[in-house]
Image: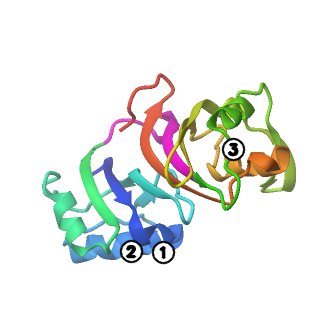
Amino acid sequence: MDKLRLRFAKTGRAIYISHLDLMAVMQRAFARADLPLKFSEGFNPHPQISILLPLSVGTASVCELMDFRLREDRDLKTLPERLTAVLPDGIKALEAYESERKSAQLKWLEIEGLFEYDSVRPEADALEAFFRQPELVIERKTKRGFGQTDIRPAIQRIAFTDADEGLRLQARISAQEPTLNPDHLVSALRQLAPELAPDFAKFTRLETYDADGKVYR
């Protein structure tokens, strides 16, 4: 079976599983669930399985997408339940379907976050005003070392509200071209407005969208 896609969640303690370890976990789960993955041809064959947007360690998600191919036909309706039964706690297969959309069409990520402060908590309006600036140039690590990048074009919208634990974030950010890691939002505060920066932040991916703002599957 070709062009298959799995939507799955990665929450709880599973957020600390690295991308490479997650790939190994998924391959073992397919084998244990009697879902034989198709392998590439050539001198060094490997299972045809890939995650569209690898998740940073420590970030949760309820909308992860993984492409895979099977050697034999299987019922896609029952596949998520079979996989979840052999996956570790915190990883849950939600939906399996035939995919017709290319990964390059995935453009935006809906995220939520929580900014926690040990001492004085800034006003939500102050953070929103900061991120509304026309430019947010930060220093970030690249493949060639460190360089300066304006992350403002990668933020479609962002809002903050008060919560008991801190300030809750809701934002839509660029998933690809350019890619914006939610941690860069914190980096921007620490570099450009340290008085607004949280002492701790955590994020969750909620949904994926294409360039037109339609849900991407």
* Alpha carbons under labels 2 and 3: distance apart: 41 Å
Picture disc at residue 133 = none
> Which residue corresponds to the image point at 34% horizontal and 36% vertical from the top-left?
100
Within 10 Å of disc 1 (Cα), the crowding (few <14, some 14-19, many 20+) is few
> Which residue corresponds to the image point at 35% horizontal and 57% vertical from the top-left?
9
x then y, percent, for residue 165: 52, 55
* Residue at image mark 1: 21
* Residue at image mark 3: 122
Q: In this orientation, which residue lies closer to the viewer: 202 or 55?
A: 202
Within 10 Å of disc 3 (Cα), the crowding (few <14, some 14-19, many 20+) is some
30 in relation to 106, above or below:
below
Q: Which residues are magenta?
A: 99-114
Cβ atoms under marks 1 and 3 closer than 8 Å: no
Q: In this image, 5 relative to 42: left or right? A: left
x then y, percent, for residue 203: 53, 53
Q: Amino acid at mark 3?
A: Pro
17 in relation to 98, above or below:
below
* Alpha carbons under labels 1 and 3: distance apart: 38 Å
Q: In which quarter of the view is residue 24 placed?
A: bottom left
* Residue at image mark 2: 25
SS assignment at label 1: helix
> Which residue corresponds to the image point at 56% horizontal and 51% vertical from the top-left?
166
Cβ atoms under marks 2 and 1 closer than 8 Å: yes
* Alpha carbons under labels 2 and 1: distance apart: 6 Å
Q: Is residue 110 magenta?
A: yes
Q: Amino acid at mark 2?
A: Val
Q: In which quarter of the view is residue 150 placed?
A: top right
x then y, percent, for residue 142: 78, 54
Earlier-in-chain disc, 2 versus 3: 2
Q: Is residue 95 magenta?
A: no
SS assignment at label 2: helix
